[in-house]
C-alpha cells in the first residue's frame, strides 16, 4: 500500500483503470458468458416448442383441406391427439414461465439485490419496450384462433460504486435464478468509482407491463 501511496495521482488512476480492465475480463469469463449460454439454450427450447407446434398445425391444416369439414373417425382421433399435444406444450410453456420473476415483482427484486450489496447505489432505473420473443400460431379450426405469445419485459438499470462492489453486485445478480440480464456497459467515471448499465429482463405470457 505504501508503494501505491508513493506514486503520482496520474499513476494511481492508470493503475486502477488497468485493474478495471482485468475485472471486466473476469466478469466476462465467469458471469457474462454463462448468462449468454443460458439465453441461447432458452431460445433453442422455445424454437423446439414452435417446431412441434408447426408440425401439428400443418398436419391439421392439410387434413382439413383434403378431407373437408367432417373427416372420418381415424382422422378425428388423430386430430384430437394433435390438439392434446399442443395443449401439453402450452402447459410446458406455462411451467417454464414459473422459472422467471413475474413482471410486477421485477422492481422489488432489483431493490433487494441493491440492499444485498451496500457499496452499490442506484443511479437510474427505467423500463424498456416490451418485445415479443416468440409467437405460436393458432390451430386451424381452433377456438377463436388464439395465438400464444411469449413476451420479454425489461428494465435498464444503472448502478454506481467501486470496482469490487460492482463486481460483487454482478455475481449476486447472476446467482438469482429468476432474473436474466443481457447487455452490460461498464464505464469509469472518476477515481475510484465507476458505473454499470445493465438490461435486466424476465419472460411472461402476459403482455401487461408496469412502468417505472
Image (cartoon, grey):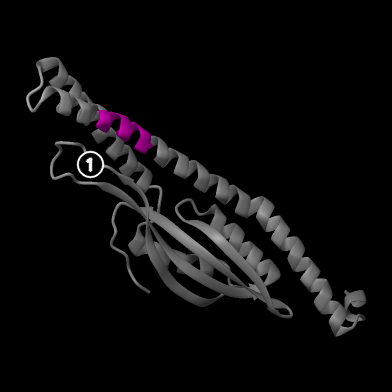
Q: Nearer the viewer, residue 55 or 13?
A: 55
Residue furthest to the left in view is: 70
Q: Is residue 122 magenta?
A: no
Rendering coords of residue 152 (x, y %): 39, 56
Kindly identify which residue carries mark 1: 138
Which residue is located at x 75 percent, y 65 percent? 21
Residue 132 % position (x, y): 36, 55
18 relative to 139 in the view: left or right: right
Q: Is residue 207 above or below residue 88?
A: below
Residue 198 picture quarter: bottom right
By secondary structure, the bulk of the magenta-drawn segment is best described as: helix
Nearer to the camera, 169 or 60: 60
Horizontal relation, residue 105 to residue 188: left or right: left
Q: Position of residue 153 (x, y in %)?
A: 39, 60
Residue sitting at the far bottom: 9
The answer to which of 36 and 64 lies nearer the viewer is: 64
From the viewer's perspective, is 167 left or right of 114? right
Quadrant (top left/top right/bottom left/bottom right) for the C terminus = bottom left
**Which region shows up in magenta?**
49-58
- Residue that appears at 83% across and 72% down: 15
Amino acid at each position: 500500500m505504501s508503494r501505491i501511496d508513493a506514486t503520482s495521482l496520474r499513476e494511481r488512476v492508470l493503475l486502477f483503470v488497468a485493474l478495471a480492465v482485468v475485472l471486466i475480463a473476469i466478469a466476462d469469463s465467469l458471469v457474462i458468458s454463462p448468462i449468454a449460454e443460458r439465453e441461447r439454450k432458452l431460445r433453442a427450447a422455445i424454437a423446439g416448442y414452435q417446431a412441434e407446434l408447426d408440425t401439428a398445425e400443418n398436419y391439421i391444416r392439410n387434413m382439413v383441406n383434403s378431407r373437408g369439414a367432417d373427416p372420418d373417425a381415424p382422422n378425428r382421433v388423430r386430430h384430437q391427439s394433435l390438439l392434446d399435444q399442443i395443449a401439453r406444450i402450452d402447459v410446458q410453456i406455462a411451467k417454464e414461465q414459473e422459472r422467471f420473476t413475474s413482471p410486477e415483482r421485477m422492481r422489488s427484486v432489483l431493490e433487494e439485490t441493491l440492499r444485498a450489496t451496500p457499496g452499490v447505489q442506484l443511479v437510474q432505473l427505467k423500463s424498456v419496450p416490451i418485445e415479443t420473443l416468440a409467437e405460436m400460431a393458432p390451430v386451424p379450426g381452433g377456438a377463436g384462433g388464439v395465438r400464444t405469445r411469449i413476451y420479454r419485459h425489461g428494465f435498464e438499470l444503472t448502478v454506481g460504486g467501486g470496482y469490487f462492489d460492482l463486481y460483487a453486485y454482478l455475481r449476486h445478480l447472476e446467482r438469482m435464478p429468476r432474473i436474466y440480464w443481457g447487455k452490460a456497459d461498464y464505464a469509469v467515471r472518476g477515481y475510484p468509482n465507476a458505473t454499470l448499465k445493465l438490461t435486466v429482463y424476465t419472460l411472461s405470457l402476459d403482455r401487461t407491463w408496469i412502468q417505472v
